[in-house]
Image (spheres, grey):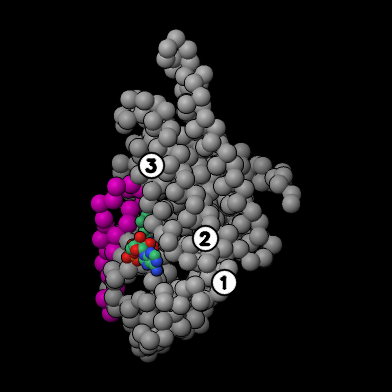
Amino acid sequence: MDYALSEQQQAFRETAMRFAKEKLAPHYQKRASEDRIDRALMKEMGALGLIAPDLPEQYGGLGESSVTAGIIIEQIAYGDFNASYVPLLASLMGGMLAQHASPDIAQEWLPKVTAGEAIIGLGLTEPRGGSDAANLILRAEKSGNGYRLNGEKTSISFSDQCEAAVIFARTGKVEDGARGVSAFFVDLNQNGVTRTHFDDIGTKPVGRGSIFLDDLFVPAECLMAEENKGFSKIMTGFDFSRALIGLECLGPAQASVDESWHYTTERNAFERPIAQFQGVSFPLAEAETQLTMMRQLCYFTLSLRDRRLPHTAEAAMCKWYVPKVACEIIHQCLLTHGHYGYTTDLPFHQRYLDVMGLQIGDGTAQIQKLVIAREKVGRVAVQYARQP
Ligand SMILES: Cc1cc2nc3c(=O)[nH]c(=O)nc-3n(C[C@H](O)[C@H](O)[C@H](O)COP(=O)(O)OP(=O)(O)OC[C@H]3O[C@@H](n4cnc5c(N)ncnc54)[C@H](O)[C@@H]3O)c2cc1C
């Protein structure tokens, strides 16, 4: 395997790193207490080509690789975890639209996404639960030259900020499970849509909430992929976001470790820098080891995707393992800073709360392990769970 970055990837990395260190990191905590994403920063990211460069050029992307998208997301998350939700969601949802939406919809919306002028949300989870995602009930009934949508999606990132969303709805019978689900592109700025905002413990600028659709008419051209095939065709996009989420969670963990190394050389106890105590340096050395291994796994998974090779199990590994270990590393870094680490002057508590959300979002660790088991021994591992 070739692990070297191309010149182009190196340039993206440096641009993203500079933007993260100069523009994002200094005010990460201040922005983290706000309940809106900073739209001006989003547009700056877009102007620098940092939002979904993996999308095709005809839709405002740069035709770059999945690995390049990952490189950028890791760097942005190093400076501001919340800001990194923008390129992450743009790559996931943008990829879905580029592949499965009508060319007119893709042409209208994707250039706005890559420019940082629009957010497209993902509407999958419903109040009765997210793990058994195919068992959804939000209804789409045929009506004239389109569909009428009725029901509630909940726990949706950017619920009250996204301009549009891909909504998964039941078009077939409940007994059909995943085979009766379709996906629709829905412009949310219209009558028939109401939204709520949860009071979350982290990722406040992203925010989550419910989206209610009340007899909302969507034209037939908003159907993505084929009717009743929405689930099987579109869910493969999650193999992409799961590897990207791994890199997103790595960013703040690496930032915490970098800051902790620095602190160990400046802070003295027993008349010497605390770096001299192996009880202090070894946990950081262990964290560096874990970060290096996890980074390799995430980029390996993305490189499999770029080479169009199977990567479902690897993506699930990224998704369950990295957010969990990243939280453990950030916790350790807080402790390395002693009483000072327990204040809100330092960013460790904020990073911890922000990253923790992705131990749940996009599927919990248990669900990812079911995916890995299914990839290894087949559907016998998940028959009771009706997993996609
Ligand atoms: C920060 C964040 C962002 C999110 N963003 C979005 C979004 O943009 N769009 C969207 O649609 N959803 C989003 N979600 C929802 C998320 O995908 C769901 O919360 C997740 O899939 C779990 O569903 P649930 O919360 O209903 O838990 P449940 O499905 O009710 O599960 C509860 C617990 O039971 C466990 N469990 C369930 N089934 C099994 C099983 N078969 N074996 C073992 N354990 C099991 C779960 O792991 C979990 O611990 C987000 C969630 C969070 C926290």
Q: Residue 5 location, x and y as percent? A: 70, 45
Q: Write down the residue under mark 2.
A: 316
Q: Is residue 383 above or below residue 352?
A: below
**Residue stretch rendered in magenta on the structure:** 193-216
Q: Write down the residue under mark 3.
A: 352
**Mark 2–mark 1 contact, CB under 8 Å?**
no
Query: Is residue 202 covered in magenta?
Result: yes
Query: Is residue 174 covered in magenta?
Result: no
**Mark 3–mark 1 contact, CB under 8 Å?**
no
Ligand 1 in which quarter: bottom left
Q: Write down the residue under mark 1.
A: 377
**Mark 2–mark 3 contact, CB under 8 Å?**
no
Amino acid type shown at disc 2: Ala
Q: Residue at x 33, y 25 (%)?
A: 339
Q: Residue at x 36, y 48 (%)?
A: 203
Q: Earlier in the sequence, mark 2 or mark 3?
A: 2
Q: Residue 92 location, x and y as percent? A: 51, 61
Q: Residue 167 location, x and y as percent? A: 39, 72
Q: Earlier in the sequence, mark 3 or mark 1?
A: 3
Q: Is residue 249 above or below residue 209?
A: above
Q: Is mark 1 within 8 Å of ligand 1?
A: no
Amino acid type shown at disc 3: Tyr
Amino acid type shown at disc 1: Val
Question: Residue 148: which quarter of the image?
Answer: bottom left
Q: Along the line of sight, which residue is nearer the eye, 384 or 266?
A: 384
Drawn side of residue 103 relative to residue 82, left or right? right
Q: Which of pointers 2 and 1 indicates the residue nearer the eye? A: 1
